Amino acid sequence: MKIIYTMSVDEESLENDRFVPSVDSIYGEKFDKCKSKYWEKKPPLVLGVTSYGQSMKTLKQKCHLGLPPNLRCAVWIASVMRVAHPQQPLPVSDSYGTNAKSSTINAGWESVLNTIFPNPSDETDAIAPDLGLSQELLTQVIKNDYSKFINGTARPRGGEKSLTRILCAVQQILGIEYCPVLPDIATMMLAYMPESYVYATLREMIGDTSNFLPVCLKDHYAWCKTYYFFVKRMFPQAYKVMMLCGALTVEGLDPIFKRFFRTLLKPDDALHFLDIFLVEGCKAIFRLSLSLVGLLSKNELKTINFTDATSWWNAIKAITLSPTFSFQKHLDKKVYPRFGKATRRYPKRRVLSRMIRYNEQWALDNMPVYIDQTPPKPMGYIPGKPIILAKPALVRSNLVKWLPVALKSTKLDLIYSTENDGRSLSAFYEKCKRTKHTIVLIEAMTKSSNNKVTIGMFASQSWNVHPTSYGDGECFLFRADPDAKCFHWTPDFSSGFDDIENQVIREQFMVARNEYLAMGANADGTNGLRLDQDLNQGESYPALGFGNEPLAGENMKSFEVGTVEVYRLVRDVDGKAVDREVDESVWNLGGM
């Protein structure tokens, strides 16, 4: 007989009151429970103190000593809740670190994932946004920089996917386009927190930007300028050297304001600093970064040959990465000597906030135009239909880039497929005759090889048999996979009245006959893309106006056709087609 044990009400209540244990979302490992005389198994974070100010002061002192690994998840999120919501009662903030809140936090994360990844392939093929760090450095973060946290083992794919999900949520749900420190912070958090807790913590940090993170390019430049000001004021000799070698430029400060000290500190020291940062906020970043400047002696400033910013930070790393360097001693002596009695006048939070606001105008005048290189969020599609060619997220991501602005916030709805509706132009026209703005995807193949190329065209009018060409300049041709490229139509303003024939050929956007279907044309009778009556054979040549390459490849101007799919566009907001159905009588030419 199998006995099933269930918790009593008192036991369940006791379990809910306890702090949630840390979880390694990168490697999937658990942390051993360890006792600490400074921490309890349940709230409050600080015992015997009721006032907010005194409780926060004591909590900061405890975090300066470093957190037990098994309590990092609970203390991190509770600390951020305290800082982000100072008006909130302390027991409420601390409760976010307990098991009682876990179901709420997990449910919120599931809702976020369902929003940003409505289709399974969206998550499978998702590309992590770099948030200004650059895709090259983001790849380094994912594959190299955090691969030695546990026994030097390689990062499993699950860790990469966890970071990708977090960064996609930050960009698409929280609306953050530029925050280069965030990938490093998120990765360190994932080593001790479930994804749901990482997202919940980052959401609160982003909502309280004055205390934690620069969340746009303007803020990033203002923070760098503020750091420049305090280096000049506190370390005049080092300031001169840093100015000469470029270490005080915005780019020169990347190790601090883009990589969150990850390249300047040992991994354990970076985690120790994260313990402090999540309860102190941006003040901790400026304190630590200013203290690092003071590591070089006056003699070293004179004797070391600083040729560029890299050489400056290499000199700092030679000290901080040395086996003899103690980060705890550095905190005690240089960053927080005797806690509150610093020999140097580090800027206080209010002074920092005023300086950052003051430097915002300088930032606006000097910052470049930021262009996000991350592929856009893929178009969604209506589930329950047997789509094939539009399933890869990369294909749908490219389609978003190519569509007119007014049609970008749409989903794909399959209205015709050779797999389900028959392989003939008549069936094609029947399914498409009432729909404007369609995307046609075509699988191009050759007999001599197993190569398959997904190509297609965007039509601005409905496909109907028509005696003349029609459509307009919104039409475009494209290759979706591999080597995705789009070929929009462009007018020729150089031609005059004597070149009417060439202009007529150039404006053959859509051609719909009983015998074939095509887009784009040439004087020799070839087309940019053409399908025969049975949808078995196709061809693609460079067409006037579109300037396209042969879509299937230079050596595949003629090809066999595999699957053909046609999609209409429906609005994301309400699921309705972007165009009203076209009245068939418009195309009734019997009386003409």
Image (cartoon, grey):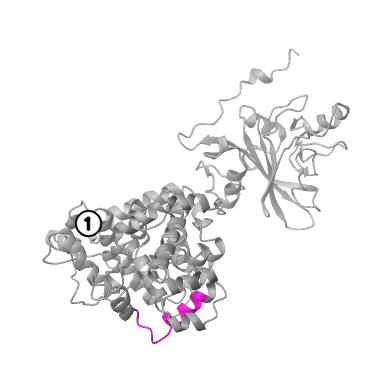
Q: Is residue 294 above or below residue 15?
A: below
Q: Position of residue 56 (x, y in %)?
A: 21, 63
Residue at the limit of the structure toward the bottom, as seen here: 324
Magenta span: predominant SS is helix
Q: Residue 584 vs residue 140: left or right?
A: right
Q: Position of residue 67 (x, y in %)?
A: 28, 72
Q: Position of residue 98 (x, y in %)?
A: 23, 61
Q: Which residues are magenta?
A: 312-327
Residue in the picture at 47% in, 52% down: 362
Which residue, given by chain and number where applicable, does mark 1 sit on?
Answer: 93
Quarter the C terminus occupies: top right
In this figure, what is the number of numbered marks?
1
Dot 1 alpha-carbon crowd within 10 angstroms: few under 14, some 14 to 19, many 20 or more: many
Which residue type carries mark 1?
Ser
Q: Secondary structure at mark 1?
A: helix
Give the camera-side residue of 578 and 328: 328
Q: Residue 55 falls in which quadrant of the image?
A: bottom left
